[in-house]
Every structure is written in structure tokens, then in C-alpha cells.
Image (cartoon, helix red, strand yellow):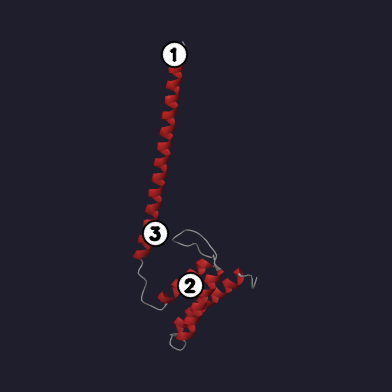
């Protein structure tokens, strides 16, 4: 009788261990699939970014700085990390670089290029001042 109980216990324990192992394997498979899915999404983003060929015009010089400043001001989600983050110091540096660009190209830009650059700088400065709580 005792032997039957012990045999039954062993069988039950063995079944329980097998179920636990199965669940572990399933979790590992799920994590692997999630990782693969994330990797595919990341690869797609990189491919999409590589496929975009900007036009050969003045805005192609300004927009990367402008976009990065918007991201660092926390106004736009970073397309590569899908995160929003604020870095006001870096945003200010990017705005200053655009200001420097404006100073160095003064008198050499077409009127529409100058308007575009001034508008970008103005928008960024206003957003920076609001974020830095200089203005409300």
C-alpha cells in the first residue's frame, strides 16, 4: 500500500515537473518570438530611414538640425527609439548651431531660404523658452 502511494506520488511529481518544464519552454519560445519581432521592427525602421533620399536643396541642410531640436525639446517622438525625452541643453546647442548657420550665410541665401531658416529658428526658440519656463 505504501509502495503504491509512493509510486503514485512519484508519478504526480514527475507530471508536475514535466508541466513546469513545458511552461518554461513556452515562455522561452514566446520571448524568442517577441525578440525576433522587435528585431524585425528595428530592421524595418532602419531600412525605411535608409531608403529616404533627401532632395538637394537648402532645406536638406536645415531640417536635420530642426528635427533633432524638436526631439530634444520633447515635442516629437524619436523615430528610432520611439521614446520622448527632453534634453534642453542639447536643444539649445542645436538652435545655436542654426543661428550660427544663419549668421555665416547672411547675404548669400535666396529670400525663401532665409525666410525658411528664420522661421525654423523662431519656432525652436519659442518652444525652448516655453520648455525652459522663460515664458508662459
Q: Would you call the spot at circle 2 few (<14 residues within 10 Å), some (14-19), or many (20 or more)? A: many
Q: Residue at x 38, y 78 (%)?
A: 57
Foreground pick, 104 / 136: 104
The residue that label 2 is drawn on is: 66
> Which SS class for mark 2?
helix
Q: Which comes before the other along the chain, label 3 or label 1?
A: 1
Disc 3 residue crowd, few under 14, some 14–19, many 20+, Cα 10 Å: some
The residue depicted at 39 percent of the width and 45 percent of the height is 32
Disc 3: which residue: 45
Circle 3 or circle 1, nearest the eye: 1
Name the quadrant containing residue 25. top left
Q: Are marks 3 and 1 in contact (CB under 8 Å)?
A: no
Q: Is residue 104 above or below residue 90?
A: below
Closer to the chain start, of discs 3 and 2, is 3
Nearer the observer, 31 or 106: 31
At mark 1, the secondary structure is helix
Q: Position of residue 130 (x, y in %)?
A: 61, 70
What residue does disc 1 label? Answer: 4
**Furthest residue in direction top, as rendered:** 1
Label 1: how many Cα within 10 Å (few below 14, some 14–19, many 20+) = few
Distance (Cα) linking label 3 and label 2: 20 Å
Amino acid at each position: 500500500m505504501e509502495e503504491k502511494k509512493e509510486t503514485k506520488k512519484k508519478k504526480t511529481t514527475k507530471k508536475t515537473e514535466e508541466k513546469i518544464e513545458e511552461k518554461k519552454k513556452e515562455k522561452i519560445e514566446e520571448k524568442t518570438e517577441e525578440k525576433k519581432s522587435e528585431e524585425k521592427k528595428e530592421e524595418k525602421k532602419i531600412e525605411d530611414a535608409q531608403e529616404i533620399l533627401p532632395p538637394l536643396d537648402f532645406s536638406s541642410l536645415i531640417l536635420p538640425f530642426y528635427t533633432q531640436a524638436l526631439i530634444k525639446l520633447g515635442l516629437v517622438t524619436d523615430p528610432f527609439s520611439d521614446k520622448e525625452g527632453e534634453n534642453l541643453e542639447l536643444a539649445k546647442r542645436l538652435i545655436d548651431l542654426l543661428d550660427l548657420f544663419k549668421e555665416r550665410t547672411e547675404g548669400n541665401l535666396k529670400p525663401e531660404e532665409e525666410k525658411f531658416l528664420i522661421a525654423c529658428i523662431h519656432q525652436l526658440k519659442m518652444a525652448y523658452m516655453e520648455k525652459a519656463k522663460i515664458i508662459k
